[in-house]
Amino acid sequence: MDCFAVLAMSSVFSINGETRAMTGFNENTTTERPTFVTHLECSMTGKRYQADRLHGLSEAGKPLLVRYDLDGVAAALSKEELATRPWDMWRYRELLPVRRAENIVSLGEPVTPLVALPACARELGVGEILVKDESRLPTGSFKARGLALAVAMAKELGVTRMAMPTNGNAGAALAAYASRCGIESFVFCPDDTPDVNVREIALQGAKVWKVNGLINDCGKIVGDGKDAMGWFDISTLKEPYRIEGKKTMGLELAEQLGWETPDAIFYPTGGGTGLIGMWKAFAELENIGWIGPRRPHMVAVQAAGCAPIVRAWEQGAEHAELWEGAHTVAAGIRVPVAIGDFLILRAVRDSAGYALAAPDEEIVAAQAEVARRDGLLMGPEGATTFAALRRAAQKGLVGKTSRVVLFNCGTALKYPMPAVSRTLDRHQPIDWAALAGA
């Protein structure tokens, strides 16, 4: 089955070679559509919570999951109807929690393309490598999905002030979407966060501070300030709706592959919201009859300098312990402790997947290799998935017939790149042989 080739941020798209115009671009965000949320549910205990009310964590201190009347979704929406809709994230409205179109907060979130890496696949001996390139989203990363949904629900539920810790990209997305709808935002990031991220957050309207610590230290500040500042804590998995935004990665992927799933998904894992969200998406799609029971192996990928999920998986533990002294060039996945650790590990194990870590030198080499061989510039977090795939291929975990999807979660343009020192003096003779051999 050929993949859909979606030209993100464009007025045309292609399905199996047939080019179509993207008409009625705002239809998904302006048309009222039926919603099917029934309740929220504690991910640990199963206790039910009322929908349409503002919630953080459950009484057990665990993430809440949004539940739907999936029989109602199946009766209301067909694949044929879905295929007529504009190609953006909001095409899946019946499987999303926003009740009223007026509360949708959008900056034009496209369906992100699947980019093949044929040269890299040949080099690794893997059947097919596809990269879902999330760098095409607003603010340059997949954080736009979760924050667009979370901010929309905050707007719907009357929130006026929000706060979060961030390693960079999530803070930029919060700033953008909160500014879009007039919600005040406060962002706290480790003091070694890439400067371009900090400036981006500030430029898009958030009040931002650099903190002498890691993201969990920033998260403590957000939690400690909740009563004094009256803000809503939108930290990863501390509210129910970022998962629902990230879930759209799984919905898109299944649709792009003709309502099938790949053999494996390699996902750069910090807080793990996207991995959890995709696993939820596949279950919901099966329940409405759009896919079968086959699931991809979910592979949680971390940097060796911060790999609490990998360690917990290797130890057979249900929860991950705090990773001391976390450090990696892949700043976006430098999360020493994740509140949804047990959900990540359950998805990995239930899918017969695994967890892998790659050292920084392999991450840097992977970024250069993918760019050189197939022309795709991946951020360091995305490049971590390719480094992990190389390790998986060497171990025989993927092979010559495997279709593997990697997630490039953000643009590399926000990170430092290797310096280029070669110059030419236009007033001097050019040594063409030396130039050719450079």
Image (cartoon, grey):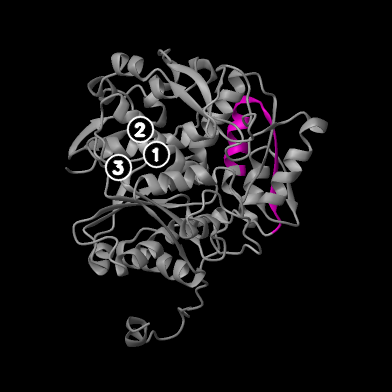
* Residue receiving disc 1: 279
* Residue receiving disc 2: 283
Quarter of the figure with residue 395: bottom left
Q: In this view, does 254 lie above or below 430?
A: above
Task: Say which amino acid is labelled 3.
Answer: Arg
Quarter of the figure with residue 29: top left
Q: In this view, does 185 lie to the left or right of 44?
A: right
Which residue: 68% across, 55% down? 214
Which residue: 24% across, 39% down? 260
- Quarter placement of the C terminus: bottom left
Is 196 contained in the magenta span? Answer: no
Q: Marks 2 and 1: CB-CB under 8 Å?
A: yes
Marks 3 and 1, how far apart at CA: 9 Å
Q: Can residue 22 be spotted in the picture?
A: no
Q: In this view, does 406 lie above or below 150?
A: below
- The residue stretch that appears in magenta: 171-191
Percent from the top left, x then y, of residue 58? 62, 29
What secondary structure is found at the residue carrying circle 1?
helix
Task: Say which amino acid is labelled 1.
Answer: Trp
Is 181 contained in the magenta span? Answer: yes
Which residue: 21% across, 35% down? 19
* Residue receiving disc 3: 295
Instruction: Return the residue nearer the eye: 93 or 301.
Output: 301
Q: Marks 2 and 3: CB-CB under 8 Å?
A: no
